Amino acid sequence: LAAHGIDPPYLLYVGTLLGRRHIDRLIGAFAEIAPEFESLTLVLVGANRLRDPGALAQWIRRAGVGKRVRLVGYVGDSLLPALYRNAELCYYLSSYEGFGLPPLEALASGTPVVVSDGLALDDLWPDYPYRCVEPSVASIAGATRRLLVDVLSVDGGAEHPLLREGRTRVRQLSWRRTADTFLREVARAVADAG
């Protein structure tokens, strides 16, 4: 991680940087909580595919957090487990996604996530407590604060039950379960159309 300029403690975003993933709001939320958590940095991992690639630097500059944001770009799969494992939390906030693997990868690594609706986590863990129904700066900052205080401040370094629960739920995912669910949905659609 040090070779990429990443030193814990940090908050992590993994995924292509796209407009629908609210990177501007994430940076704004980080700027809001940064004075309260002075040792944290925000690490953005993924290729910049914003319509205006220069907007990213503008958002960081306007938020006043330039020295505390690390733009890593794309990394190979071999680095991802260490990135997830060493992060305090991971973000995945999107207006729409097909599935959304990064939150599941983070939970499998024992790292909590702040997420939006519309991801695989909706079905896997419908009452997940650190979800932003509307990914606004205020809701992202609020969920981040709650998570940092609730989950990561456990006395004596004990693991919070939420982290164990996350790994347990992700282990429930399998290709067999996916196929069974798909077949049930197809059968239901056929019956409804019939």
Image (cartoon, helix red, strand yellow):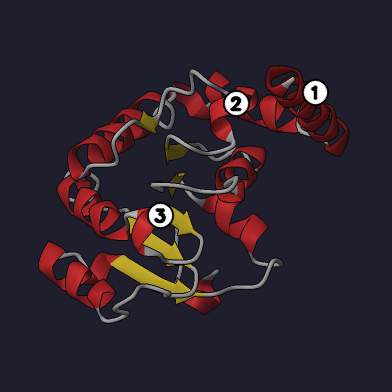
Give the numbered dot on residue 101: none
Residue shown at the point (48%, 74%) measured from the top left = 47
Would you name the residue on which mark 1 appears?
187
Q: Is residue 157 left or right of residue 60?
A: right
Quarter of the image with the C terminus is top right
Q: Earlier in the sequence, mark 3 or mark 2?
A: 3
Q: Are marks 1 and 2 in contact (CB under 8 Å)?
A: no
Kind of residue indicated by mark 1: Ala
Residue shown at the point (43%, 39%) measured from the top left = 115
For disc 3, the neighbor class at 10 Å (few under 14, some 14 to 19, many from 20) is many
Would you name the residue on which mark 3 appears?
10
Residue shown at the point (49%, 50%) measured from the top left = 87
Element under label 2? helix
Which of the two residues, 12 or 74, is positioned nearer the viewer here? 74
Q: Earlier in the sequence, mark 3 or mark 1?
A: 3
Give the numbered dot on residue 123: 2
Q: Earlier in the sequence, mark 1 or mark 2?
A: 2
Q: Quadrant of residue 53?
A: bottom left
Mark 3–mark 2 distance (CA, rounded to whole Å): 28 Å
Which mark is in front, 3 or 1? 1
Which of the two residues, 188 or 114, is positioned nearer the viewer here? 188
Q: In this picture, is 153 found above or below 138? A: above
